[in-house]
Image (cartoon, rainbow, N blue to C red):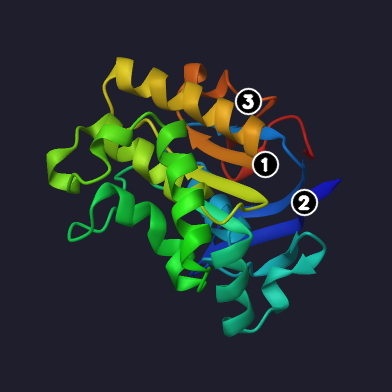
Amino acid sequence: MQVLQAQGVGRRFGARWVIRGLDMVLEAGERVALLGPSGCGKTTLLNVLGGLDRPDEGRVLLEGEALDQASPSRLAALRRTRLGTIFQFFHLIPTLTAGENIELPLRMLAWPEAAIQERCATLIQAVGLEHRAAAWPAELSGGEMQRVAVARALAARPAVLLADEPTGNLDRASGRAVLALLAELTEREGSALVMVTHSEAAAGICHRVLRMEDGQFLGGPA
């Protein structure tokens, strides 16, 4: 089953096309790496796939629904429920504990309290941080913060997880642990993954690697 499609997608800033004419398909549960040098358009493509930016040409379909045609309110709803995002610099809320950060997306969706507690207990155990649930982000290591961010991104059971350099701010050992966790949890949860990375090691957890250069996929459509 196809959960995400890009059809002839292009995005420009001023007169310069950063990406153009990109086609790709993501299957349910599939992990895909976007690999390439800085400035080649990886993050721009990720932002378009996630509905943060609208394409200047082409379209993106999430489970058959065109993101570029969705109203702002509908797009926000899709991003809360069907898309999860992991950032290089964690973006945890500093005034919430680790556990509260994981709960936040579900509270915004008005899940019942019992369901929130059950889901978050499952996730914090899955990322190995039961003993750190009450810790503030400032008390966590980089690797721990990213594990919280992974759990938070998966909380609402998204169809697609988007990760932008998820190990870029971690030491090698912590990075390996986060990559192993991403592979394990996406497999368990059934979420597809699109991961922007410079790292061949990070790309190694993915089923496919799409190499980018100058706003294009090397080797044609994906």
Q: Position of residue 143 (x, y in %)?
A: 29, 30
- Judging by the rendered image, the residue that carries numbered circle 2 is 3
The mark found on residue 206 in the picture is 3
Choose the circle earlier in sequence order: 2 or 1: 2
Q: Residue furthest front?
A: 114
Choose the circle earlier in sequence order: 2 or 3: 2
Choose the circle earlier in sequence order: 3 or 1: 1
At 20% across and 32% down in the image, what residue appears?
141
The mark found on residue 132 in the picture is none
Tag 2 near tag 1, CB within 8 Å: yes
Q: Position of residue 43 (x, y in %)?
A: 49, 48
Residue 29 appears in view: yes
Q: Position of residue 90 (x, y in %)?
A: 31, 46
At 40% across and 18% down in the image, what residue appears?
176
Q: Amino acid at mark 1?
A: Ala
Q: Is 77 or 48 nearer to us in this picture?
A: 77
